[in-house]
Image: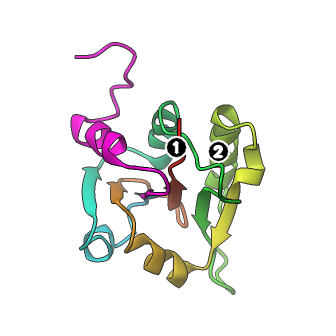
Amino acid sequence: MLKHIPPILSPELLKVLCEMGHSDRIVLADGNFPAESVGKQSIVIRCDGHGVPELLDAILQFFPLDTYTEHPVSLMEVMPGDPAKTPIWDEYRAIVAKHDDRGDDAIGTIERFRFYDEAKTAYAIVATGEKAVYANVMLQKGVV
């Protein structure tokens, strides 16, 4: 056991966060995301039973967001014509603002299929049990 480490962060996830370097990306994937097929070239970490907001908050306590890119936090865009709502994005905005002075300005969106393509090059994908739709988040690591 370690002090001051949120218990939601498993040893495997902590190891990956430490291994990642500047500009490496990690995806926090909702329960519908094809983590295993998209993550064939990445490290896939299972966090079933956990939601994205609590993992995002725990990770951003330690994970510096890249200051050399406009949007180090990327959300998967809703497909045109899809009536899905994304109230979870408001939670993400509040969490990012809590940990990064840029707040909402640090967050951008990526078209759904482009998000999948970019996720294929991520260092790691965290497969969660998040039930909200379009709840996928990609974080780009900065420097301390």
40 relative to 129 in the view: left or right: left
* Residue 9 falls in image quadrant: top left
x 53%, y 81%: residue: 114
Secondary element at image label 2: helix
Q: Position of residue 89 (x, y in %)?
A: 65, 54
On the image, numbered disc 1 is attached to which residue? 53
Q: Position of residue 138 (x, y in %)?
A: 51, 59
Q: Position of residue 21 (x, y in %)?
A: 41, 50
Q: Looking at the image, tell me whether mark 2 or mark 1 is earlier in sequence order.
A: 1
Secondary element at image label 1: helix
> Residue reaching furthest bottom?
81
Q: Is residue 85 in view? A: no
Residue 14 part of the magenta-drawn span: yes
Q: Amino acid at mark 1?
A: Pro
Instruction: Give the answer, above or below, for where 34 lies relative to 63.
Output: below
Q: Position of residue 136 (x, y in %)?
A: 50, 62
Q: Amino acid at mark 2?
A: Glu
x 22%, y 41%: residue: 12
Q: Is residue 19 in view? A: yes
Instruction: Give the answer, above or below, for where 71 lies relative to 40.
Output: above
Instruction: Give the answer, above or below, for where 8 lies relative to 77.
Output: above
Q: Which mark is residue 85?
A: none
Task: Give how far apart the Cα atoms at labels 2 and 1 are.
Answer: 7 Å
x 66%, y 68%: residue: 109
Q: Are marks 2 and 1 in contact (CB under 8 Å)?
A: yes
Q: Which residue range is magenta in the image?
A: 1-27
> Residue reaching furthest top?
3
On the image, numbered disc 2 is attached to which residue? 91
Q: Quadrant of the N terminus?
A: top left
**Mark 1 crowd level (few <14, some 14–19, many ≥20, 10 Å Cα):** some
Q: Nearer the viewer, residue 114 or 49?
A: 114
64 relative to 41 in the view: left or right: right
